[in-house]
Image (spheres, rainbow, N blue to C red):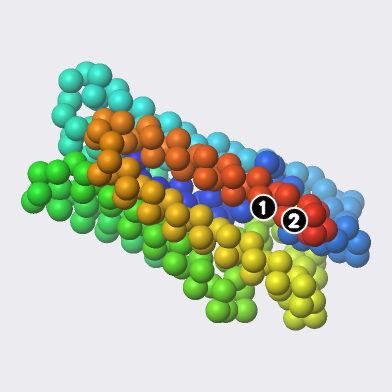
Amino acid sequence: MTTANRGVHTMEASSTPQNATDVPVTDGAGTAGAGTDGGDAPAARRRTRALRRRLAAQLLFELVIPLGSYYGLRAAGAGQWLSMIAGGLLLLPWIGYGIVRQRRVEAMAVFTLSLVVAGTLLSLITGSPRVLMVRDSWVTAAIGFWVLGTLLTRRPFIMAASRGVVIAKVGEAGLVAWEGRWDVEPMFRHHLRLITAVWGSVFLLDAVLRVVLAYAIPVDAFPLTSTVLWLALLGGLLTFHNWYITRHGLKL
C-alpha cells in the first residue's frame, strides 16, 4: 500500500491531532473568536464537517481498500506481485479524483503516480515484489526531506498545513492575525519550527524502518506490518503534537 497520498493528506488535514480543533492558532485571546461569532459559526461548522469527511475518505481509499485488496487477493490464490500491483492501481482513481477536484495538476499527485509506474517497471525487471515494498520508502523519505526543507523558509510546513483548519476555526481575519504572529513573536516561530522538525523526522524514520522491514520479514507480512508501523508512528506523532501545542498555549 502506497503512503504518498496518505502522507501528504495527513500533512494537510491531520496536522491537528485528535479532532479538527487542535491547531496551533492562538494563546486563547484576541483572535480566537474573531471568525466564529454570529453568521460565521455555521460556516465554520460546515468546514469542520467537510474536513472530517475528507479524513474518513482518506482512511477508506488509502488504507482499507488497498490493504484489504492485497489480503483478499492473496486469500483467493493470487500471487504476491499481482496482489501488490492491485493495491497500487486502486489508488490511481483516488489520485485522479484529487486532481479533478482541485481543478489543477498537483505536483505531489504526479510525483506519486510516477513512483507507482517506476516501481511497477522495476518489479517487472527484477521479478521481486520487495522492490515494490521499498518504493513507498522513496515517497516517505521525499516527504520527510521536503518537510525539513521548509525549515529554511518563512513558512515552515506546520504553518502551511494548518491554514485550512485555522480558517475553519477563526475565519479569514483570524488567519491573517495568526500568520502575523510569525513576524512579531520569536517563540511562535520557534514552536512551529520545532513541530515541523519533528514531523519531518518521523517521516524519515518511517522510510528507514520500511526498508528494513522490506528485506527482513516475509513478503505477505509486509503490507499489514508496515501499516501497523505507520499507524503507530502517526499516533505517537499526533500525541506529541497535541501535548506540545497544549503545553505551550498554541491550541485554539
Q: Residue at x 39, y 39 (%)?
A: 226
Q: Secondary structure at mark 2?
A: helix
Task: Name the outermost residue toward the front.
Answer: 216
Drawn side of residue 22 relative to residue 133, left or right: right
Q: Foreground: 118 or 90?
A: 118
Quadrant where the image shows the C terminus: bottom right
Quadrant where the image shows the N terminus: top left
Number of residues whose C-alpha sits closer than 10 Å to that of mark 2, classed few (under 14), some (14–19) or many (20 or more): many
Q: Is residue 184 above or below residue 217?
A: below
Can residue 30 be seen here? The reply is yes
Q: Residue at x 89, y 51 (%)?
A: 38
**Quarter holding residue 164:** bottom right
Amino acid type of disc 1?
A: His
Drawn side of residue 191 relative to residue 184, left or right: left
Drawn side of residue 219 relative to residue 54, left or right: left
Q: Secondary structure at mark 1?
A: helix
x, y percent for residue 214: 28, 44
What residue is disc 1 on? 241
| Separation of marks 2 and 1 at Cα, in angstroms | 6 Å
Number of residues whose C-alpha sits closer than 10 Å to that of mark 1, classed few (under 14), some (14–19) or many (20 or more): many
Q: Is residue 195 above or below residue 236?
A: below
Amino acid type of disc 2?
A: Ile
Q: Foreground: 101 or 161?
A: 161
Q: Residue at x 46, y 62 (%)?
A: 144
> Contact, CB < 8 Å: mark 2 with mark 1?
yes
What residue is disc 2 on? 245
Q: Foreground: 55 or 230?
A: 230
x, y percent for residue 199: 56, 58
**Quarter holding residue 53:** top right
Q: Which disc, if any, is residue 232?
A: none
x, y percent for residue 155: 61, 74
